[in-house]
Image: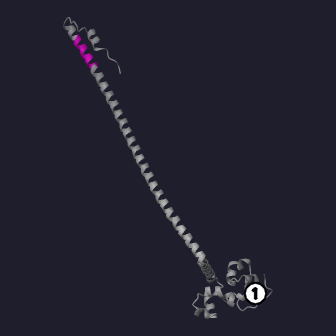
Amino acid sequence: MQNSEPLVDKLDVAGINAPQDQASVAQSKNSLETILQELRSEFARNSFAERQLRARAAQRAAKARAEASSALARAADADARREQAERELAELADRSLRLESSLREAAATLNSLHKMGLFRLTRQRFRDWRHAKLIRNSPLFDAGWYVQRYPEVETSGLDPAHEFLWNAALLGRNPGPGFDSSRYLLQHTDVAQTGMNPLLHYILFGAAEGREIRPADAQPTGRPSK
């Protein structure tokens, strides 16, 4: 900003301290008007600069308030997330305790069943169910043919697949026209020694091992394999 000459000095230069005549008065008046105009211009410039400074200060203050508000919002959000995480951890710990209690109860129950022999019986029943399902789904097992060939099966009320699973080796029963149980055991004496159902053995092991099977009522040939 351009510094103006002090007003007193200008007044002295204008010679208004002792005006001599009309021309001097006019000259002094003009000088005063010039000085006044310069002062007004300087005041306007100062006012404009002040307004700019105030505007920039207001912008900085607004930005600072916005940043402070955003920081507070982030802090509040972080607190909310922390509280939510703490609640979830508490719920997880509670569920873990309940699960641990349930596992202890289940272990105690299984131990009791094991001591009573019921666990072994349940496991045997599940194994029989799975094996009967394998037999039932085998193309070598024909439930209609089996019931017709052994009518007592129908009167027993047992499922044909289960009845064959339990009694095939003992009674020499065949599951269908395509499989001779007795001849399978005669040909494969190692299977007979295990006491395993012949068709079940063939399904689980014999087919993959390439063991020979014969239709029901067919005469075996060759020597038994071991």
**Residue at point 66% right, 88% down?**
167
Counting the numbered discs, the total is 1
Seen at 49% across and 62% down, the residue is: 95
Q: In the orientation shown, which residue stands out farthest toward the right?
A: 223
Left or right for 138, reference 225? left
Where residue 74 sits: x, y (%)? Answer: 42, 46
Position of residue 70 relative to residue 186, above or below, is above
Q: Nearer the viewer, residue 74 or 15?
A: 74
Q: Amino acid at mark 1?
A: Leu
Q: Is residue 160 left or right of residue 221?
A: left
Residue 85 placement (x, y as % from top left): 46, 54
Q: Which residues are magenta?
A: 27-38
Q: Is residue 175 visible?
A: no
What is the crowding at mark 1: few (fewer than 14 residues within 10 Å), some, or many (at least 20)? some
Q: How is the image coloured?
A: one colour
Q: Is residue 45 left or right of residue 157?
A: left
Residue 224, percent across and down?
A: 79, 85
Report the predominant secondary structure element of the magenta stretch: helix
Residue at the image position 34 percent from the left and 35 percent from the top: 58
Q: Nearer the viewer, residue 112 or 206?
A: 112
Q: Position of residue 114 (x, y in %)?
A: 60, 75
Magenta segment includes 30? yes
Instruction: Check residue 175 for magenta coloring.
Output: no
Observer-nearest residue: 22 or 126?
126
Closer to the camera, 3 or 118? 118
Quadrant containing the C terminus is bottom right
Residue pointed to by mark 1: 186
Identified at 56% across, 70% down, the residue is 108
Query: Which quadrant of the structure image shows residue 107?
Result: bottom right
